[in-house]
Image (tube, rainbow, N blue to C red):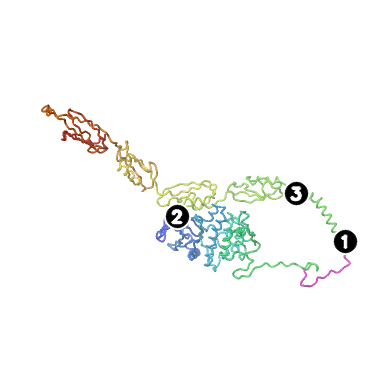
Amino acid sequence: MIGRRISDRYDILSRLGEGGMAVVYKAKDLILDRLVAVKILRHDFSNDEEFIRRFRREAESVASLSHPNIVNIYDIGEEDDCYFIVMEYVQGITLKKFIKSYSPVSFQEVVYIAKQIALALAHAHERGIVHRDIKPHNILIDENENVKVTDFGIALGVTSATITYTNSILGSAHYISPEQASGGKATIKSDIYAFGIVLFELLTDRIPYPGSSPVTVAIKHLNDPFPYPKDFRHDIPQSLENVVIKAVEKNPNLRYDTMNELYEDLDTALEPNRLNEPRRERHDDISPMEYESTDQEETIKIPAVPRKTENLTEEQKPNEGNKPSKKPKKTKKKRFWLWITLLILMILIGASVAAFYIFPKLFYVQDTTVPDLKGMKYQNAVKQLKEKHLKSLRRNVADNQIDKGKVARQDPESQTEVKENSSVTVYVSTGAKKEILDNYIGYDRQSVLDLIRDKNYKEIVWKKEYSSTIPEGEVMKQDPSPGKKIIPSQTTLELTYSAGEEEQSVPDLTGLNEDEAKSKLDHLGLKMKVKDGDYSDSIEKGNVLEQTPQQGESLKKGSSVIVYLSKGKELKPETIKKTVKVELDQNQNDQNQTEQKPTHVQIIYTDASHHNETFVDEEINETKSYTIPLTINPNESANYQVLINGEVKKEETIDYDED
């Protein structure tokens, strides 16, 4: 189903969980752009009218409910024999996992969570709907401890016919009410009983009636006294324990009448004046069949056993009515009976003496110590018991730790003192118990880790594999395959999960020009972004100086690599000195020796620090040299002019020399 689109609207993303008749997936609602949970009837039942009817009944039941503590139903549909219900997606965990993860839960938290469950059930009951399968597995809780009750898959209207325990595989025996266990109807009182067990588990992190089979547990619900929560957690306030006691009364008539009544009791349970109230009386001795039913059924009572009178003397017979009893007549045999009584008394005294001093020696049985048989082969265990004058009683049992044919455990335990000729039950291992391997394909990796935490596999090997179709983190293969019978402690479970689309190793682009780098990335399905880099004495201008990510890192196809292009060598201002020689006009001097005038010299220059500034402005009478310091910035120039008597005689521009 992963990747399929249902009703041209819901894209199936991953599997969230599964139950007896349906599988729940996380999906995307393409129209409203939100995540939803889609419950899909198993294909095995798509042609079974009973299951289809039950599946539709769930949708109809919950669709009529609207409450913040009940999972909302958004849509119901059918497509190509695929029956589905679209529900609110709750980002959280089950209450079962919450209890295992956070126990002991504070009493304030217990009451806060329990009140939300009670409100949800009260809302359903007021609309004529009995949940029938209240248990921590069907209660979701988010990180803020907001509760959502879900899975009304076996919900019934209050007036509908019941499904008896004996012909139903739905629900959990650990939370079943006594009246359901005995084949009676599921009513509001049944939900109240199941709620009481959930509250018990919230408080104690345990179930009241553990057992190896549903039938065993159901019988305990019928016959065994309900344990007190304070026996397992001594600091529970008495007021809170009293709520549990009343909710789980075996007689439904002694329970709360409604969930609203239970809620009100729960709401005040932690008030100071109630914390040390007296413990509520428990009525475990009242059979659930011994009450006047809410359906006006006749109360069933066990009649008193009559006392037999035919072999009694007149004096021993009961006095009937107000008739006076008859006094015994005096007889002549009175003395005879007195002697008989004395004779019997003497015989009894003699027998007592014999019992104390003679018979023990005749019938005394020696004590012996039970040997330690664990790990022995059965034949050796029998031999050990014979040596101790004990008998063996063999029982076969599956055991994951003890080899086949060897003793797994014994009863009584070793070093126990027993009488000779007693029997010792020897439990012989038939080897590890085989289990049907679950199907983990389609689950995300974290969900699988939660499922296999207590499976005790020999080894769990995780492998990843790239996939463009399976969401990242989702299990896509498993070995051994689902459904195979295995012994977990002897099995290496190999799980392959999707790593998403295949990643590419980033190449080294250093020194390549822009076109070369782009071509190399295009070949790998990667994109290139260009940015200006720094100066470099070794990388030519315009070539790749740096890159992000670095060489060897992995990127998915379509990802971008940023390249920084070199600016080349860093250029600095240079200073040059230009020497200018100014010579006098010889002809002028020769002609006017008697009237020689000084020569007016001006030098004007522009460089990085000056603009048309005067370097020299003077009159000279003889040839003179001038050295002009010029500072030139990269990619710029400097110039100067020499003026003699106001006339430009020399002008020069000097460019920056990159070499």
Residue 568: give x, y in percent of width and height. Answer: 30, 38
> Disc 3 marks which residue?
365
- Judged by depth in the image, the label closer to the viewer, 1 or 3, is 1
The quadrant in which residue 290 appears is bottom right
Q: Is residue 646 above or below residue 297?
A: above
Q: Quadrant of the C terminus?
A: top left
Q: Which residues are magenta?
A: 318-335
Q: Closest to the observer: 131 or 304?
A: 131
In the drawing, does residue 240 fall left or right of residue 335?
A: left
Q: Secondary structure at mark 1?
A: helix
The residues bearing labels 2 and 3 have C-alpha atoms spaced at a distance of 69 Å
Residue 334: give x, y in percent of width and height. Answer: 87, 65
Q: Is residue 349 visible?
A: yes
> Disc 2 marks which residue?
14
The quadrant in which residue 553 appears is top left
Residue 495: give x, y in percent of width and height. Answer: 47, 48
> Considering only order in the chain, which callout, 3 or 2, is on the residue closer to the N terminus?
2
> Considering only order in the chain, which callout, 2 or 1, is on the residue closer to the N terminus?
2
Residue type (three-letter) at the residue carrying disc 1: Trp
Residue type (three-letter) at the residue carrying disc 2: Ser
Q: Closest to the observer: 624 or 114?
A: 624
- Judged by depth in the image, the label closer to the viewer, 2 or 3, is 2
Residue 519: give x, y in percent of width and height. Answer: 31, 44
Q: What residue is shown at x 63% (from left), y 54% (from top)?
A: 231
Q: What residue is shown at x 54% (from left), y 52% (from top)?
A: 102
Residue 322 falls within the magenta-colored stretch: yes
Q: Closest to the observer: 199 or 3?
A: 199
Q: Is residue 543 above or below residue 424?
A: above
Mark seen at residue 339: 1
Q: Is residue 32 above or below residue 500?
A: below
Furthest residue in direction front, as rendered: 595
Q: Is residue 166 visible?
A: no
